[in-house]
Amino acid sequence: MNNVFSGRSVSLMGLVLGLASMAFAVGYLQMVEYLDPCNLCILDRAVVIGLCIVFAIALIHNPVNVGRKVYAALATLLSLTGIAICARHIWLQNLPKDQVPDCGAGFWYMLDTMPLAGFLDTILNGSGECADIQWQLFGLSIPELTLILFVTFLLLSVAMFVTTGRVHNR
């Protein structure tokens, strides 16, 4: 009998979760609700895409032992990066109005015109648009929901790290 938490099934769960979250973000929030993502939301999406790539390659490759742990380490690193970005975003949303930073230039403009170090510093400091709560589900803002998503990715990464090798049906 196949183990529910084999490396391949964990990779599949991570990939499906990532694709579903991107479909929700782009297909519903952006296309139906007409919410443009702020700079930190764009970074969150980039991390989710990175996680999808790691889980997809792990699913196709289906490595054992060391290879699986490498994919798990990459997924863990990306999950922790997403958690840090969400924590910063939630912190910005909970600042008093008089302490919210001014709105800055757009993501793509800054990426084109600034050196990478300056771009990352500016993005991670956030801007006034990142402090706006534009949509909620069950009283949770988008960054709070995304934090739950990244914690789930982290749990899947840990599950991938501790799972057994390939499952062979004989």
Image (cartoon, rainbow, N blue to C red):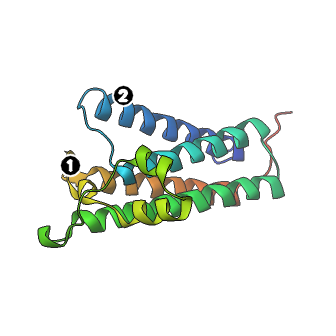
Query: Residue 49, how many percent across, how many down?
Result: 54, 42
CA separation in Å, label 1 and label 2: 20 Å
- Circle 2 sits in a helix, a strand or a loop, which is it? helix
- Circle 1 sits in a helix, a strand or a loop, which is it? loop
- The answer, for residue 112, to whether it is visible in the render is yes
Quarter of the N terminus within the rendering: top right
* Placement of 80 over or under 57, stated as above or below: below
Quarter of the C terminus within the rendering: top right
Q: Is residue 128 left or right of residue 50?
A: left
Residue at x 29% of width, y 68% of height = 91
Q: Mark 1, mark 2: which one is toward the viewer?
A: 2
- The answer, for residue 65, to whether it is visible in the render is no
Local crowd size for mark 2, using a 10 Å CA cut-off: few (<14), some (14–19), many (≥20)? some
Q: Is residue 128 left or right of residue 61?
A: left
Query: Residue 85, how many percent across, how many down?
Result: 43, 61
Residue corresponding to mark 1: 138
* Placement of 161 over or under 9, stated as above or below: below
Residue at x 47% of width, y 51% of height = 113
Q: Amino acid at mark 2?
A: Gly
Residue in the foreground of this view, choosing between 117 and 67: 117
Q: How many marks?
A: 2
Residue corresponding to mark 2: 27
Query: Residue 9, how many percent across, how many down?
Result: 65, 41
Local crowd size for mark 1, using a 10 Å CA cut-off: few (<14), some (14–19), many (≥20)? few
